[in-house]
């Protein structure tokens, strides 16, 4: 079992049902039965998914209200998003720099070509 | 079709049908005859739709044994056992066949006679299959005998090409929907298309009638091949037909038959002329190439089709220059890494098996070591290496922040020449022998980058930006 936060979050996000639950929660808090509605799944099955999300810190469940609504916690999600963005950014910015570098190289080459002509 | 009656082993009386079918195949007798007597070929077509033959043996001589295990779409295996009674190549063959259920109980004993007659270069095949004995449980199998043999002969066509054609049949250990995806999604198709050693840059894959596919096949020796297709018929997930409109010209058809958790794919290329077909086979090794292509697809399917990370960019510079910028140490440190980062080298040995060991210092001062072990260096077309995180001494480490990030990633970079002195660079990443946890983490992360988790990521991203 993974112990670091990032791996735990990724493991929780690996399941499409759990991702759909999170997407639903972006509209605001919801009860277990509300969350179960779009899926062809039993309440215990949904509860299991919620447990995984809760353990990963992706959702919190209120202790006050009797229906214990689920709420999205953006913290771990932000960390995962940052991780993914890092790789995207790595190559996109590298490509930008490469593009820029190649442009300079071509400029220099052109100058080299022109010199003898000017003489 | 006629029927007589027989007392079966049980008390019930069953009708014993006789099936007679004729078909004409646009292929020489020898070719059609061989499809019946070569066990490898026989396995590719014998049996009705949705069936495969996990085991198929035939000892092609009088008295020789026939042993075919037929697997139904539900995974149930039906053994067929028989003996060859007569065999005159390439004219006729007579054999017995006892069909059993999966528990080994006899269902139907048949006598099968096939004649091959030559008709103006084509082959007229006549099949006679007569049930000579049947158990009381065989009623439904007897009822299906005619249709079963008819479908069986339909499938025989798939392995008997005419002299302008090349044909191949493959059984893939994957459901049909997945095999379909492999043929119709660029990121998947790029991974297996072409003979061994070929890589692909796919620009367009518009799989619908009238749609165009445009891709470049990169040969292992550095030669690039432009390919353009126009799809003529697309029936998801059953059939794809297209015209190959860059040389060599041909029409291709791929049929996918659903065999439960397996898929039977029948591939056929029809060339404009016999001469062109001969040239493609003899000069380009097209048959071997097609077999290798199918084997690669099988391997990709067996690997569980892990997600890959793919990113590409078209740069306004000729390919030679991009290659230089990528492979020459001083040039690479000018651009490699995100804005504000700096690369320093321990070594860069640009050859197969050579090592590039570097430190990247981010704009915030954090230093990370990385290591590439080059697998393929083909200037100016491709660069393939195994990437891992590393330490100062060049050891392989895990990512310090994410131990479940794959330890080794196969990185493939293709440099494809574009008109107007431009170059398209495509980078692909795939984890190497990942553990289950590594595979999950990589796929979750990469899938989100490639396709946004089917829309959910967009919603989550929007949420993050406003919370």
Image (cartoon, coloured by chain):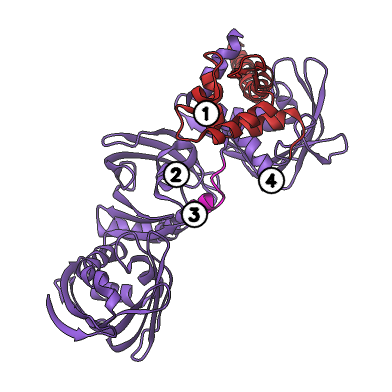
Chain colours: A red, B purple
Question: Foreground residue, A42 or B296?
Answer: A42
Question: Foreground residue, B361 or B444?
Answer: B444
**Does residue B315 appear in this view?**
no
Q: Is residue B400 left or right of residue B79?
A: right
Does B305 lie within the magenta span? yes
* Mark 2 chain: B
Q: On residue B435, which mark appears?
A: 4
Q: Position of residue B219 (x, y in %)?
A: 51, 46
Q: On residue B298, which mark appears?
A: 3
Cα separation between marks 2 and 1: 18 Å
Does B376 lie within the magenta span? no
Task: Give the residue displayed 38% in from the left and 88% down from the top.
Answer: B64
Q: Earlier in the sequence, mark 3 or mark 4?
A: 3
Q: Earlier in the sequence, mark 4 or mark 2?
A: 2
Q: Position of residue A33 (x, y in %)?
A: 51, 25
**Same-subunit check for callouts 3 and 2:** yes
Cα separation between marks 1 and 4: 22 Å
Magenta region: B296-306
Classify mark 3: helix, strand or loop.
Answer: helix
The quadrant in which residue B178 appears is top left
Cα separation between marks 3 and 4: 21 Å
Q: Position of residue B229 (x, y in %)?
A: 33, 40
């Amino acid at each position: 079992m993974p112990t670091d936060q990032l791996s735990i979050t990724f493991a929780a996000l690996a399941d499409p049902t759990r991702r759909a639950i999170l997407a639903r929660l972006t509209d605001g808090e919801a009860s277990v039965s509300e969350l179960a509605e779009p899926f062809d799944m039993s309440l215990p099955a949904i509860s299991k998914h919620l447990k995984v999300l809760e353990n990963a810190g992706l959702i919190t469940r209120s202790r006050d209200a009797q229906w214990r609504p689920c709420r999205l916690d953006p913290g771990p999600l932000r960390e995962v998003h940052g991780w993914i963005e890092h790789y995207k950014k790595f190559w996109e910015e590298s490509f930008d720099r490469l593009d820029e570098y190649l442009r300079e190289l071509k400029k220099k080459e052109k100058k080299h070509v022109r010199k003898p002509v000017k003489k | 079709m006629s029927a007589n009656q027989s007392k079966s082993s049980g008390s019930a009386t069953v009708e014993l049908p006789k099936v007679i079918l004729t078909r004409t195949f646009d292929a020489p007798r020898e070719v059609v005859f061989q499809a019946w007597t070569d066990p490898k070929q026989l396995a590719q077509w014998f049996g009705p739709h949705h069936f495969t033959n996990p085991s198929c043996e035939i000892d092609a001589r009088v008295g020789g044994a026939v042993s075919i295990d037929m697997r139904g779409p539900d995974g149930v295996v039906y053994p067929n056992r028989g003996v060859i009674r007569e065999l005159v190549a390439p004219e006729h063959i007579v054999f017995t066949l006892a069909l059993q259920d999966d528990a080994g109980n006899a269902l139907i004993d048949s006598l099968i006679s096939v004649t091959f007659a030559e008709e103006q270069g084509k082959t007229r095949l006549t099949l006679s299959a007569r049930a000579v004995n049947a158990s009381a449980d065989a009623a439904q199998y007897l009822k299906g005998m005619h249709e079963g043999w008819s479908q069986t002969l339909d499938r025989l066509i798939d392995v008997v090409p005419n002299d302008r054609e090349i044909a191949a049949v493959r059984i893939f250990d994957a459901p049909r929907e997945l095999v379909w995806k492999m043929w119709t999604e660029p990121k998947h198709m790029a991974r297996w298309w072409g003979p061994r050693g070929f890589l692909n840059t796919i620009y367009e894959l518009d799989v619908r009638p009238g749609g165009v596919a445009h891709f470049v096949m990169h040969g292992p020796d550095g030669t690039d091949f432009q390919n353009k297709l126009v799809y003529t018929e697309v029936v998801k997930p059953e059939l794809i037909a297209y015209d190959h409109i860059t040389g060599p010209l041909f029409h291709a058809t791929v049929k996918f038959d659903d065999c439960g958790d397996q898929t039977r794919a029948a591939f056929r290329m029809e060339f404009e002329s016999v001469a062109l077909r001969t040239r493609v086979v003899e000069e380009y090794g097209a048959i071997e190439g097609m077999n290798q292509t199918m084997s690669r697809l099988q391997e990709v399917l067996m690997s569980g089709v892990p997600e890959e990370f793919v990113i590409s960019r078209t740069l306004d510079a000729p390919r030679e220059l991009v290659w230089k910028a990528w492979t020459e140490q001083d040039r690479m440190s000018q651009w490699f890494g995100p804005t504000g980062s700096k690369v320093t080298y321990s070594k860069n040995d640009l050859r197969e098996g050579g090592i590039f060991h570097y430190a990247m210092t981010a704009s915030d001062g954090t230093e990370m070591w990385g290591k590439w072990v080059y697998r393929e260096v083909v200037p100016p077309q491709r660069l393939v290496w195994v990437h891992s995180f590393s330490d100062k001494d060049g050891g392989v480490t895990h990512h310090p922040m994410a131990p479940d990030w794959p330890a080794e990633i196969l990185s493939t970079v293709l440099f494809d020449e574009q008109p107007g002195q431009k170059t398209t660079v495509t980078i692909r990443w795939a984890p190497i022998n990942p553990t289950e946890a590594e595979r999950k983490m990589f796929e979750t992360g990469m899938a989100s980058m490639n396709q946004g988790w089917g829309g959910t990521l967009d919603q989550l991203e929007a949420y993050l930006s406003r919370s």
